[in-house]
Image: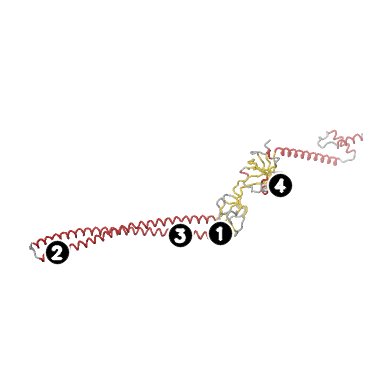
């Protein structure tokens, strides 16, 4: 009976770890057998618990491995992924010296905000000089306009006076001519009477004197009339000459506009010494220190533009056929443990990393376990989830296969 019980005990211990627990009768017999061998019940139960825990752990491991295998079969997974964003190298259109920076690395900036200033003393002096020229021209134009207005009023008064004198001279000329004609007629009448010896020579001499006096006065008045007419013409010419001075004002205005254009250009140059943020973003790194030499075409500051970020995942060439635009994806990041971000495949690259600069791929082929080509896949995240993501963070991407 004892030998039979020992054989049953050995068979029980050699059973597979996944078999069910023995029924209560076999357990009772086994327990009796173990007790008969001198083993304590506490040790027996401890061994039983250890076996059950081992079986449970093995089953859990089998389930985990099965789920992992199923997940792998449904998804294309890449740990060779990185957060990307719009990185801009901001420079200036002037060469010069970096005088001051006004935004620190990591600082959020707004579009148009001043980031740095170049040395601008020479341009500032030029702007001030041109502003002084403009002020002088404006003052000269105002003075010339006032002078012209004064001269116009003065010439009008002179013309009115000349017209009045001309009119008076004309009247005097008419009167003098009338007196001269009358004196000549009286002289002729006296001459006729003298020839007929009806008057004395004294009366004749008096008539002749009156005639000569009237003629002289008529000539004098005629000369005065000619002078007044000449003065009138001079007044008209001087009034007309003001038009030339008005044309000079036009020349001054043209010079003023040209100088204002120079001022705008100088002000634009002065504005060009300011380095402004092209858009909302974050300062990543200054490429120059204060006092550094700035050259046209060379960047001064590196900054992240806007909040538009995405994930760039590099997929092995033997897995890329399972990826299609529009496939959903799950993104996890070491910087955000326990958080899963949902996304969708937005674009698939057209070349492998062999055709790209080595620094483009987060894990270059020289550092990967496999050296086979990889292709980039762009995963676009939901806008509400990407506010805290910084370009350059590493990520792991699981893309649901298009076959599923």
Q: Nearer the viewer, mark 1 or mark 2?
A: 2
Circle nearer the N terminus (4, 3): 3
Q: CA distance from mark 1 to mark 3?
A: 24 Å
> Which label's residue is closer to the chain start, 1 or 3?
1
SS of the residue at dot 2?
helix
**Quadrant assignment, res 94:** bottom right
263 left or right, relative to 12: left
Say whether residue 263 is left or right of residue 32.
Answer: left
Looking at marks 4 and 2 on the same chain, the residue that comes earlier in the sequence is marked by 2
Identify the colour scheme used.
Answer: secondary structure
* Residue 183 screen position, x and y as percent: 15, 61
Q: CA distance from mark 4 to mark 2?
A: 137 Å
- Residue 133, numbered circle: 3
Labelled pair 1, 4 in contact (Cβ < 8 Å) = no
Residue 282 locus on image (x, y percent): 60, 51
Q: On the rendered structure, is 153 left or right of 31? A: left
């Amino acid at each position: 009976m004892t030998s039979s019980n020992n054989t049953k005990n050995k068979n029980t211990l050699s059973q597979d770890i996944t078999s069910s627990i023995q029924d209560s009768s076999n357990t009772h017999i086994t327990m009796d057998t173990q007790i008969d061998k001198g083993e304590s019940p506490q040790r027996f139960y401890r061994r039983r618990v250890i076996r059950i825990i081992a079986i449970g752990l093995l089953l859990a491991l089998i389930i985990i491995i099965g789920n992992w295998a199923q997940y792998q079969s449904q998804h294309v997974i890449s740990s060779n992924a990185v957060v990307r964003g719009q990185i801009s190298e901001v420079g200036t259109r002037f060469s010069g010296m970096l005088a001051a920076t006004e935004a620190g690395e990591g600082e959020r900036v707004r579009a148009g905000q001043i980031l740095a200033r170049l040395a601008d003393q020479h341009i500032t002096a030029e702007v001030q000089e041109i502003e002084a020229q403009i002020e002088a021209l404006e003052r000269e134009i105002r003075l010339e306009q006032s002078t012209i207005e004064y001269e116009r009023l003065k010439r009008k008064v002179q013309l009115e006076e000349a017209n009045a004198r001309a009119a008076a001279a004309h009247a005097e000329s008419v009167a003098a001519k009338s007196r001269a004609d009358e004196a000549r007629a009286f002289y002729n009448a006296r001459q006729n009477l003298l020839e007929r010896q009806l008057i004395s020579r004294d009366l004749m001499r008096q008539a002749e004197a009156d005639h000569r006096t009237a003629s002289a006065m008529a000539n004098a008045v005629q000369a005065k009339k000619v002078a007044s007419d000449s003065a009138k013409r001079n007044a008209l010419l001087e009034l007309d000459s003001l038009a030339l001075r008005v044309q000079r004002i036009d020349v001054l205005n043209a010079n003023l506009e040209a100088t204002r254009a120079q001022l705008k250009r100088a002000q634009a140059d002065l504005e060009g010494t300011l380095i402004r943020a092209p858009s909302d973003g974050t300062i990543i790194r200054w490429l120059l220190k204060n006092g550094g030499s700035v050259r046209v075409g060379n960047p001064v500051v590196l900054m992240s533009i806007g909040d538009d970020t995405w994930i760039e995942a590099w997929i092995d060439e033997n897995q890329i056929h399972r990826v299609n635009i529009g496939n959903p994806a799950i993104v996890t990041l070491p910087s955000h443990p326990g958080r899963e971000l949902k996304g969708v495949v937005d674009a698939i690259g057209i070349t492998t990393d062999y055709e790209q600069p080595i620094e483009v791929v987060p894990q270059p082929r020289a550092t990967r376990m496999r050296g086979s080509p990889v292709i980039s896949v762009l995963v676009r995240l939901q806008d509400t989830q990407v506010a805290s993501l910084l370009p350059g963070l590493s990520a792991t991407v699981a893309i649901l296969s298009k076959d599923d």
